[in-house]
Amino acid sequence: MILSALLCLSACSYNGTYRSNLSDVCTFELPTDCAKHATQISQTGTDAEYRLGFIEYDDQGQLRDRAQQDRVLSEYLEIAGKQDVIVLTFVHGWHHSARPEDGNITEFRKMLASVSRQEAHSSQQQQRDRRPVLGVYIGWRGDSLDIPVINHATFWDRKATAHEVGRKGVTEALLRLEELVNVRNTFKDGDPPSTSRLVVIGHSFGGAVVYSSLQKILNDRFIDSRKGKNFGGNAEGFGDMVILMNPAFEALRFSSLFELSQEKCRGYFPGQLPKLAILTSESDYATKLAFPAGRFFSTVFERHRDMERYECPRPGMSNSRTVTIPQWKADRNTIGHFKPYLTHKLMPASEQGPESFDLERAYSDWSAHDVDQADIYTTVDLISMQKTTARNPYMNIAVDKELMDGHNDIWGDNIIGFISELITVSTTPQQVYEQLLQN
């Protein structure tokens, strides 16, 4: 008995702070650089220059070191107070952490460099100041055991931890990052408005972390119950874009937000931008098969019913279609594998796409709702399932396995290209769009 307990303890994954050096900003050039630094800068002086900061949480959703978060935020606040910025935040999933050799960190660096290059190109074309790219990697204990294969048995333990981390801790960090990108509006008194932007990305259980931390905020922003609000305005979200990739949480958690966006088959103005994109591989068997198998036993004694809802191919209730939503299926299947809530398909480009990304067209056609119209994205086809009205800010996308094959295949060139273009749509300054439409 004692021996078994000792073996179990010895197999537990590291339960401490990886990024404990808060003294200075480290210059990252080689894979072995900056292993313990919480703030870093890479590819200095090039079009791909970016910064990266780390914020870490324990299993109870508490900051491992509040000074670590303060160090990252103060570093970025100093930059954001002087110039507009783009902040990209990534929350990892199962089997990952903030350890220096983690593959998610390596891939996130590539994404930051890609967005930075795109920003350098766009700012030159649009004759505006280039915005620095500031990355934030939110780390938590994605594994409770370090033993390969055996650690697959931690699925439900890590699922519960992900929701705990999201509900208790990460909300504060994300809100502070949103506060950070809005800081120049205070100094500039909103004229001209700041062009700083915030994008949040979560993968797997990291998607569960992000959604648990933002679900109530997204509902609040959509309804917008503040005094004197304009009922005819655009639907707001959190920051400028939230992207969930192969997220591991139940479709039923998404139902209220989906139904809000469908309310009375409302139409959206041409200026409505995307606010939430959920991307799930059709061959992600971890969320397609293993997840509902486990949920079956945890929901077997719960009572469910069928809900009558509707789809909205076009604005107006006269165009609606009644559908039945079985609660038990929505409660056992992940959001990306629950057909009634899927809104789009993402496919390899059926023919040669445009040579370059057409920002003006993307502004008005980003949701690809017109199936008869050529796609706006350069490497993929985004196809509407005609369940929601055009420009619905929440997209739940089924991704062809040629683009994302399995649970962890989220870093392919075509996917990163699509995400980068979607981020470009959501982060381009409004005045640039206004100038495009005037010309």
Image (cartoon, grey):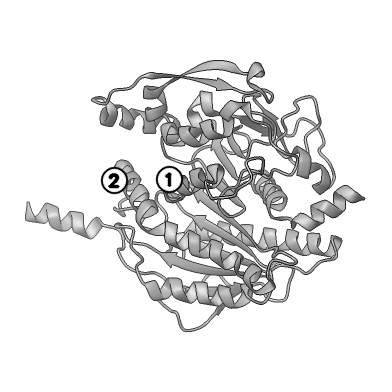
Q: Residue at x 75, y 55 (%)?
A: 430
Q: Is residue 4 above or below residue 195?
A: above
Residue 204 visible in the current orientation: yes
Q: Is residue 360 left or right of residue 109?
A: right
Name the residue at 79% across, 59% down: 122
- Name the residue type under label 1: Ala
Disc 1 target residue: 208
For label 2, the crowd category at 10 Å Cα-Cα, with few meaning under 14, some 14 to 19 and many 20 or more, is: few
* Spatial CA span between label 1 and label 2: 13 Å
> Looking at the image, which residue is at 50% across and 50% down?
202
Horizontal and vertical percent position of residue 404: 58, 39
What's under tag 2, amino acid-wise? Asp
Quarter of the figure with residue 365:
top right
Residue at the disc numbered 2 = 157
The secondary element bearing badge 2 is classed as helix
* Sequence-earlier tag: 1 or 2: 2
**346 lies left or right of 11:** right
Place residue 44 in its image quadrant: bottom right
Callout 1 touching callout 2 (CB < 8 Å): no
All told, the count of numbered labels is 2
Labels 1, 2: front one: 1
- Rendered location of residue 350, percent (x, y): 76, 30
Q: Nearer the viewer, residue 55 or 391?
A: 391
Question: 397 above or below 229?
Answer: above
